[in-house]
Amino acid sequence: MTIGVLAVQGGFAAHAKHLASVGATAVEVRTPGYFKGLDGLILPGGESTTITMGIESAGLAGPIKDHHAAGKPILGTCAGMIVADRDHLGLIDITTKRNAFGRQLASFEDDIEIDRIADGPVRAVFIRAPWVESTGDGVEVLATVRDHPVAVTEGTVTAVSFHPELTDDDRIHGWFAGECSGAGER
Ligand code: GLN
């Protein structure tokens, strides 16, 4: 199985190690030609304005939307959640609030229970993280922190406010790889 990691800007490299450890091949996606043969796509953290501009200048918005329309899963993490939202690529029916946890809580870690992730809480690393401000009817909230959604899913798109690639816990990547392995049948 091959999972692309959008490599425009930000924390794309750390995802590859986790994907390898759950048995997937990671491909750094930089141009439209990389989409052929992808089973899934990760939109990593970083700086959402820079990533959005990079997507535009590399002509990647269309291929990302085509990947989504083909029923192939997408996981957005931190800035990737913002890039996926209704105001950006429109992949998932949410709006997000950037840097939502405020200055004092710019970076923090929390053990959070996430629906669909078994075997106890996940250590979640938040770095100038967004939260989900509003959700459409089809969106399921998988986890909240301080009463704000930080993990959501709709159809084949899942978005988390934190950085699952920055801990040793592979469960989110493992779950996502499982979603991607069924994608060919959709
Ligand atoms: N604060 C960043 C943004 O608004 C996201 C931070 C991150 O991805 N760690 O784009």
Image: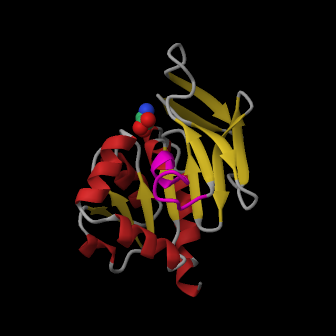
Q: Quadrant of residue 186?
A: bottom right
> Does 90 lie within the magenta span?
yes
Q: Which residues are magenta?
A: 81-92
Residue that sits furthest to the front in the current view: 87
Q: Judge from the rendering whether residue 145 lies leftward or rightward of residue 52; answer left or right.
A: right
**From the viewer's perspective, is residue 126 above or below residue 24?**
above
Closest to the observer, 35 or 185: 35
Residue 145 visible in the current orientation? yes
**From the viewer's perspective, is residue 79 above or below residue 118?**
above
Residue that sits furthest to the bottom in the current view: 185
Where residue 41 appears, x then y in whole percent? 43, 64
**From the viewer's perspective, is residue 169 above or below residue 74?**
above
Residue 171 visible in the current orientation? no
Tell me which image quadrant ligand 1 sits in. top left
Where residue 22 appears, x then y in whole percent? 47, 61
Where residue 163 appears, x then y in whole percent? 48, 40
